[in-house]
Amino acid sequence: MAASSTPHERTGTGPVGDRPVASDALANLRVLDLTRVRAGPTCCRVLADFGADVIKIEAPAGADPNDGMNGPRDGYDMQNLHRNKRSLSLNLKTPEGKAILGRLVRTADVVVENYRPDVKHRLGMDYETLRAINPRIVLASISGFGQTGPYRDRGGFDQIAQGMGGLMWLTGLPGQGPVRAGVAIADSASGLYAVVGILIALAERGDSGEGQWVQTSLLQSQIALLDFQAARYLIDGVVPEQAGNDHPTSTPMGLYRTADGFINIGASGEDLWRRLCRAIGHPTLAERPEFRSEPDRLANRPQLNAELGAILAERPSREWLDAFTAHGVPAGPVNRMDEVFADPQVEHLGMAVPVQHPRRGAIRLVGQPVVLSRTPAGIAAPTPEAGAHTDDILGGLGYTPQEVADFRSRRVI
């Protein structure tokens, strides 16, 4: 897939020269990562974990007033977001920096940026400019609110998108008032939707030979994640309200207290409801008129939850989970973070991936949730030092050591 006429040399997984290769899946792709904070880095992390040569382009020290928004370089957030990448120090506000970027674009397949829409034009990184340099380039732009429209030039952050996109009035207990999700869900979704768009554009490029401009935003991604809740409004005119830990349209499906903690139960539908009643030792509960059908149970949910709660409070979580498993009723524990990664199934799935850091030693990072049978994702290297690969990358572009030293003396790199 590489736009470069010379393929990147590699042998299996592992370093290629100065480059970490985590997988064979995308190892012939070169990606220029011009992103910051979370949405854009999430997109580039997926590509890097599947082997793409992701070059993280960073301003020289002191040139970017917003540097450090994800905490210290060795901190958990930077390490989790930027593993498997190479780092190039480059001042894009200088003519020389823009020229270096242009030479990089000629060798690249994908450029990912999450500036405000007007910034890319000032820096000469808009799609038409990049396309004139390399017609095969795919530009992925992630913004707060979209590349056009009345809000295009506004800065956007995850919680702002959660609020504007409807999530905060769906999250939380009834009457509690708006509640944010506990993770950066709009940021992460935007990064993942951008990956989808990039891979579609690359697949289409195989037929047309041309790249294209991929666009998504925090606001669009957040609305898309509303899924059936948004469809309830668009099709039936229902404005969903907060439902707390209960499923908004089905019951019993939600959180229940046990003798020693909490469990989640999913017993939607008639068969699972009857299985649940047998598992808790009260099969006649399924025959009561107020609980006989799904609409009956939904109409009488407070009463149903109260009765189930009284029964479930009599025994500890583990006993109930064993009983539900034996009866084929979906249920699970409510884990804190330490319990998540101690769970035997999570350990089996390999969601905590070890990597060696030069200063922090052995650390674990969050793995990719997608498994490929032949070319799985991997983590080959921790987040590099800022500018660690500058000399190697510029040398690969044909710059001499003297030119690189001159760029450094003039703070171009």
Image (cartoon, rainbow, N blue to C red):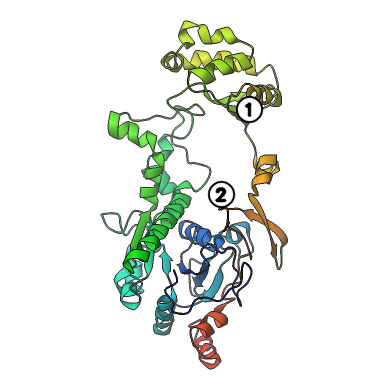
The reply, left or right, for residue 168 in relation to residue 70 is left
Numbered disc in front, either 1 or 2: 2
Depth order, front residue of 121/85:
85
Depth order, front residue of 110/308:
110
The reply, left or right, for residue 406 in relation to residue 72 is left
The reply, left or right, for residue 374 in relation to residue 38 is right
Q: What amino acid is at disc 1?
A: Phe
In this figure, which residue is indicated by the disc labeled 1? Answer: 262
Residue 13's label in the rendered image is none
- Which SS class for mark 1? strand
x and y percentages locating residue 95 in the rendered image: 39, 83
Disc 1 to disc 2, how far (Cα)?
26 Å
x and y percentages locating residue 56 in the rendered image: 51, 70
- 395 above or below 301? below
Residue pictured at 41% horizontal, 16% vertical: 295
In this figure, which residue is indicated by the disc labeled 2? Answer: 369
- Which SS class for mark 2? loop
* Extreme-right residue of the structure: 361
Residue pictured at 51% horizontal, 81% vertical: 413
